[in-house]
Image (spheres, rainbow, N blue to C red):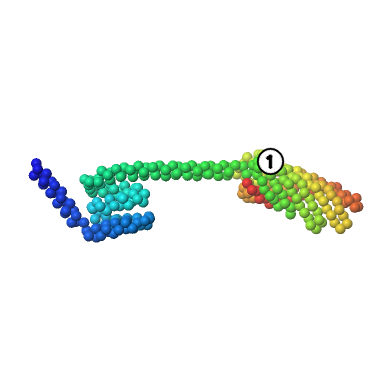
C-alpha cells in the first residue's frame, strides 16, 4: 500500500513537471508582464493593461490554469463579475484539485450573488423605464385622441389687422377679446366675441374644420381733424375654423352688423346695417 501511494505521488509530481515544461516561454513572459502591470495599476486603465497581458498568456497556453486565476482576480477588482466568474470556473476546470480550489469556489459563489443583485437592479431599472415610456405613450395618445377643441384652450389671433385673445370656456364654446386700430382715422375699436361650435361635427375626430355661430359687440372711438365721436357695432355671424394642427388655425366668418356712430361736434350720426367678413390666423398655446 505504501508502495502504491508512492507511485501515485510520483506520478502526480511527474505530471506537474511535464505540464510545467509544456508552458511556452511566451506565456510565462506575458504572465510576468501582467504581474508588473497589476503592481503598477492605480485605476481602471492600469487594470485593463494587466488584463491584456494575462489574456495573451492564456492564448499562448490555453490549458495553463494560472492566467485564468489572475484574470478572475483582476476582473473582480474592476467589478466585471461575469468575466471574473468565467475565468475562475475555467481555473477550477483546469486545476480541480488545487490547494485554493475551495477558496476559489467560494469566491465564485460571492461573485454570482453580487451579479444576481446587479441583474435585479438592471431589470428593475429597465422595467421602470419601460413603465415610464408606456406612461408617456399613453399621455401622448390621450393628447392625440382628445378633441382639438377643449376647455381651457387658449390662443392669440390676428384678425383684420387687429389682435385677439381666444379662450375656450367649454368644448363647444369660446369667448374672445379683440381690439383694432386704424391709424388713418384714427379709429379704435375693441370688444368681445362669443363662439358656439357645432357639437355634431365636433364628435368627428377626423375632422379639422369646425363651423360656428357667434355674436360680436365692439365699442368704437374715432377722432379726426374736425370730428370726434364714438359708437358701437353689434353683429351676428356664421363661419368656421380650420386647424392645420392642434396649435394653428385659420378662421373665416361673415354676417350682418349694425353700426351706430355719432360725431359729437356736429351731432351727425350713422345708423345702418352692413355685411361684414372676418379673416383670422390663430396660434394656440395648448
Specify whether 122 is left or right of 25.
Answer: right
Query: Measured along the vertical axis of the image, is residue 171 above or below residue 63?
Result: above
Foreground residue among 56 and 237? 56
Report the quarter where the N terminus lies: top left
- Residue sitting at x 53%, y 44%: 136
Q: Residues within 10 Å of mark 1 (few under 14, many from 20)?
A: some
* Residue 48 point in image, percent of width and height: 35, 56
Number of marks in the image?
1
Callout 1 secondary element: strand
Specify whether 279 is left or right of 54.
Answer: right
- Residue sitting at x 72%, y 49%: 164
* Residue 8 point in image, percent of width and height: 13, 46
Foreground residue among 87 and 197? 87
- Residue sitting at x 30%, y 52%: 71
* Residue 72 point in image, percent of width and height: 30, 50
Q: Name the residue under label 1.
A: 169
Q: Which residue lies furthest to the right in this view?
A: 266
Amino acid at each position: 500500500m505504501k508502495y502504491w501511494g508512492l507511485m501515485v505521488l510520483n506520478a502526480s509530481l511527474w505530471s506537474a513537471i511535464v505540464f510545467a515544461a509544456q508552458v511556452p516561454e511566451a506565456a510565462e513572459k506575458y504572465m510576468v508582464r501582467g504581474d508588473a502591470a497589476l503592481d503598477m495599476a492605480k485605476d481602471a486603465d492600469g487594470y485593463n493593461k494587466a488584463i491584456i497581458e494575462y489574456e495573451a498568456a492564456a492564448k499562448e497556453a490555453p490549458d495553463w490554469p494560472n492566467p485564468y486565476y489572475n484574470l478572475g482576480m483582476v476582473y473582480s477588482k474592476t467589478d466585471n463579475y461575469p468575466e471574473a466568474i468565467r475565468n475562475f470556473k475555467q481555473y477550477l476546470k483546469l486545476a480541480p484539485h488545487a490547494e485554493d480550489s475551495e477558496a476559489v469556489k467560494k469566491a465564485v459563489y460571492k461573485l454570482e450573488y453580487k451579479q444576481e443583485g446587479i441583474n435585479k437592479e438592471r431589470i428593475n431599472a429597465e422595467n421602470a423605464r419601460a413603465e415610464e415610456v408606456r406612461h408617456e405613450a399613453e399621455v401622448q395618445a390621450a393628447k392625440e385622441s382628445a378633441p382639438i377643441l377643449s376647455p381651457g384652450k387658449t390662443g392669440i389671433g390676428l384678425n383684420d389687422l387687429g389682435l385677439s385673445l381666444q379662450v375656450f370656456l367649454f368644448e363647444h364654446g369660446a369667448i374672445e377679446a379683440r381690439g383694432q386700430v386704424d391709424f388713418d382715422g384714427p379709429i379704435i375699436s375693441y370688444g368681445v366675441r362669443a363662439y358656439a361650435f357645432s357639437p355634431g361635427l365636433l364628435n368627428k375626430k377626423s375632422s379639422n374644420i369646425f363651423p360656428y355661430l357667434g355674436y360680436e359687440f365692439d365699442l368704437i372711438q374715432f377722432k379726426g381733424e374736425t370730428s370726434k365721436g364714438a359708437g358701437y357695432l353689434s353683429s351676428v355671424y356664421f363661419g368656421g375654423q380650420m386647424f392645420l394642427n392642434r396649435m394653428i388655425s385659420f378662421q373665416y366668418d361673415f354676417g350682418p352688423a349694425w353700426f351706430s356712430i355719432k360725431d359729437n361736434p356736429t351731432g351727425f350720426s350713422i345708423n345702418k346695417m352692413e355685411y361684414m367678413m372676418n379673416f383670422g390666423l390663430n396660434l394656440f398655446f395648448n
